Amino acid sequence: MKIAAAAYPLSFLEDFSAYEAKLTAWVSEAAGRGAGLLVFPEYGAMELAALGGAAVAADLEASLHEVARHRRAADALHLRLAAAHGLLILGASGPVFDTALHPDRPVNRATLYGPEGILGHQDKAIMTRFEREDWNVVGGESLTVFATRWGKIGVSICYDGEFPLLARSLAEAGCEILLVPSATETLAGFTRVRVGAMARALENQMISVQAPVVGLAPWCAGMEENTGRAAIYGPPDRGFPPEGILAEGGLGQSGWVYADIDLEAVRDVRRDGGVLNLTHWPEQLGPAGNLIVGGRPR
């Protein structure tokens, strides 16, 4: 299977047809290169705020509602493209007002689309300070492993990828590919998510895919500056590159990054790798629970 990770710039869109044309071109390009799984970034859907006009796009609260307003049309577009090309698309995440989770605040939701329909969605679980303190976006309450003909897939949206127990739960449920859509303003923020994505691939002996927003969008509240590079990582072990990098784009360089993935290599390294991080994970719990501070048992 070939995976495509997007380094995706936001565009000021005049109407929904402009968004349709942009997304169609991106998906068609990756499909033409033989990709079977396409990954778009966190908050890439925020470019839909432009459809409400400049004043709406520049307003933190109004932009959330404007993007959420176009969710149904965006779903339909992604489904048409997934069916037309016979592939999976993790759509760019964005705000969704789900009253089952919160009466009036949005979650940050990424949806997985397939040729036969929507496979489900993943809500970001852990909010950054900006999401908590300025945007008032709320966290999701569950994790999902998507069982597909391309393998078992999980999603850790941006900051979630910096917390090992989330990915560990997915790995224990059979996840072999972890998708890490991201949106980070600074190089430090991008580096935190990058290090997390690489660490999750190491700890769980899995593939991890980072797809960021890149470039400037001064018209879009909360998304004015975006730093990152698309990359696909694996465990640095037998059958994989020694540095764990399967493919990597240039910093700030928009476009797709591709890697051919053999899930049998994941299964082989989990079964008989030079190290067995996935299997040996529980062995840390005993020593960690017997912490000695200052030479005395706790």
Image (cartoon, grey):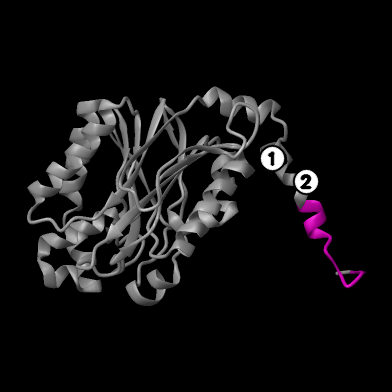
Residue 55 rendering spot, x and y as whole percentages: 13, 73
**Tag on residue 277?**
1
Considering the image in quadrants, where does the C terminus appear?
Answer: bottom right
Residue 182 rendering spot, x and y as whole percentages: 40, 54
Residue 78 visible in the current orientation: yes
- Residue at 55%, 53% (x, y): give it: 195
- The numbered mark, 1 or 2, whose residue comes first in the sequence reads 1
Q: Quadrant of residue 47?
A: bottom left
Closest to the camera, between mark 1 and mark 2, is 1
Q: Quadrant of residue 277?
A: top right
**Real-space Cα distance between discs 1 and 2?**
10 Å
- Residue at 63%, 24% (x, y): give it: 268
Magenta range: 285-296
**Tag on residue 283?**
2
Residue 83 rendering spot, x and y as whole percentages: 22, 29
- Residue at 40%, 43% (x, y): give it: 249
Say above or below: 283 vs 114: below
- Residue at 16%, 44% (x, y): give it: 22
Q: Residue flagged by tag 1: what amino acid is it?
A: Asn
Considering the image in quadrants, where does the N terminus appear?
Answer: top left
Q: Nearer the viewer, residue 49 or 255?
A: 255
Question: 10 Å neighbourhood of mark 2: few (<14), some, or many (≥20)?
Answer: few
Circle 1 sits in a helix, a strand or a loop, which is it? helix
Say above or below: 221 vs 179: below
Q: Is residue 49 left or right of residue 237?
A: left
